[in-house]
């Protein structure tokens, strides 16, 4: 039999750094935000062991579920430094939901995972409110999630945020890249900024090379540096889903880590020698990329290999449909640019214009 000193007070989970009451308070604070995302297919309520979602009403002949998972990455360090946690939830949703979208799938539901050193109910509820807002904007339900208080593993003010999303598409509308041919047109949709990749390089440039203050107002950006860097990743379901439903989209690319050079070749069908030629002057340059390149002395290829450079999503369509796609986007006040074409080539990505023509 184990024994203890009669003078010792018995330990509790709270003594070990885990506050169950704070966790319950966080759930209560986020409940309304989560419920606002529910679609008719959601069964049950927040707080169960698993989220329930019915597919009976999909109406698709051959429904296929498409899943994606990602995190926010080291961009979180900037949110922690600025004590600003209301935007990173959208980053978390967008990184998965945009990946699901490129297969042609309508987002159905999303689940998040937050790991903290010390649970602050208001902070966690603020993060989840951002997740919920992004889910609502994307038309998908925030079906559940997990908040883990990991005392002694994360520092007191540190946290990590990740999640995964699930979408649905009829097999006949699945976007695989198999139908891509030379002559197809690339239509680019603008990004809101850096989105959520490349922040290890951003932090090295901003903090180590330039030793800048995130609170500093930048005339070129019309806001503080920190506000610009924390601009959340754009959500693309609203602009893209009507195009996917009404046109023959042959390929889509979400420009994330790896930029243009790594992401675009992922959509090419095996066995075909295809590449793309892109005119980098076809869309406006965002000031933040110009500043980062100047501050870090980063060469052009490295910039386009790391960042989205102002284009967050690419749709590839037949030349005959391109004008109609652009007109549809314009009718809905969505900006888009002709940025290039698919070509027969052994080189997957060729960038032209600007410094690439020097």
Image: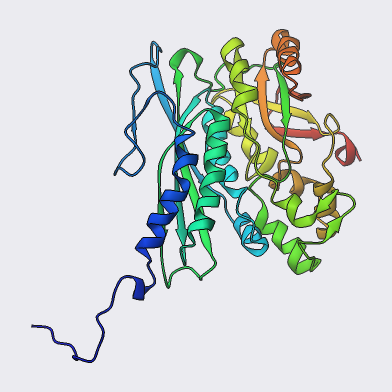
Q: Residue furthest left?
A: 1
Comparing 346 with 53, the one in front is 53
Above or below, comparing residue 137 to residue 121 in the picture: above
Comparing 235 with 133, the one in front is 133
Question: Along the horizontal axis of the image, is 117 left or right of 89?
Answer: left
Q: Quadrant of residue 181?
A: top right
Comparing 96 with 6, the one in front is 6
- Identify the image quadrant of the C terminus: top right
User: Is residue 70 something that shows in the picture?
Assistant: yes
- Identify the image quadrant of the N terminus: bottom left
Question: Along the horizontal axis of the image, is 167 left or right of 51?
Answer: right
**Residue 173, horizontal then vertical, whole percent:** 50, 15
Q: Name which residue lies at 44% across and 36% down.
A: 35
Question: Along the horizontal axis of the image, is 249 left or right of 166?
Answer: right
Above or below, comparing residue 173 to residue 148 in the picture: above
Q: Residue furthest top?
A: 320
**Residue 7, horizontal then vertical, whole percent:** 23, 92
Q: Name which residue lies at 35% across and 71% down.
A: 14
Above or below, comparing residue 328 to residue 152 in the picture: above
User: Is residue 342 something that shows in the picture?
Assistant: no
Question: Along the horizontal axis of the image, is 222 left or right of 161?
Answer: right
**Residue 114, horizontal then vertical, whole percent:** 46, 54
């Amino acid at each position: 039999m184990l024994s203890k000193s009669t003078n010792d007070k018995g330990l509790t989970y709270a003594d070990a750094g885990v506050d169950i009451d704070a966790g319950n308070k966080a759930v209560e604070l986020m409940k309304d935000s989560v419920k606002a995302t529910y679609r008719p297919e959601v069964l049950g309520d927040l707080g169960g062991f698993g989220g329930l979602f019915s597919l009976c009403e999909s109406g698709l002949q051959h429904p296929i579920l498409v899943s994606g998972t990602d995190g926010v990455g080291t961009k979180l360090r900037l949110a922690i430094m600025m004590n600003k946690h209301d935007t990173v939830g959208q980053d978390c949703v967008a990184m998965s939901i945009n990946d699901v979208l490129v297969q042609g799938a309508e987002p159905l539901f999303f689940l998040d995972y937050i790991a903290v050193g010390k649970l602050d109910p208001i902070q966690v509820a603020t993060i989840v409110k951002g997740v919920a807002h992004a889910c609502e904007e994307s038309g998908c339900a925030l079906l559940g999630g997990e908040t883990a208080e990991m005392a002694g593993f994360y520092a007191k003010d540190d946290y990590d945020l990740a999640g995964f999303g699930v979408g649905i598409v009829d097999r006949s509308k699945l976007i695989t890249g198999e139908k891509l041919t030379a002559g197809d047109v690339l239509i680019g949709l603008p990004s809101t900024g850096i989105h959520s990749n490349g922040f290890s390089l951003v932090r090295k440039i901003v903090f180590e090379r330039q030793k800048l203050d995130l609170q500093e107002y930048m005339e070129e950006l019309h806001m503080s540096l920190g506000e610009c860097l924390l601009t959340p990743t754009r959500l693309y379901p609203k602009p893209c889903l009507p195009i996917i439903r009404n046109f023959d989209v042959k390929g889509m690319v979400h420009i994330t880590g790896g930029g243009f050079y790594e992401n675009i070749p992922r959509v090419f069908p095996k066995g075909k020698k295809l590449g793309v030629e892109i005119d980098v002057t076809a869309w406006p340059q965002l000031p933040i990329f110009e500043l980062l390149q100047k501050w870090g002395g980063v060469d052009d290829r490295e910039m386009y290999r790391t960042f989205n450079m102002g284009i967050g999503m690419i749709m590839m369509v037949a030349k005959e449909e391109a004008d109609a796609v652009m007109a549809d986007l314009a009718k809905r006040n969505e900006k888009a640019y002709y940025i290039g074409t698919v070509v027969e080539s052994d080189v997957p990505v060729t960038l032209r214009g600007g410094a690439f023509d020097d």
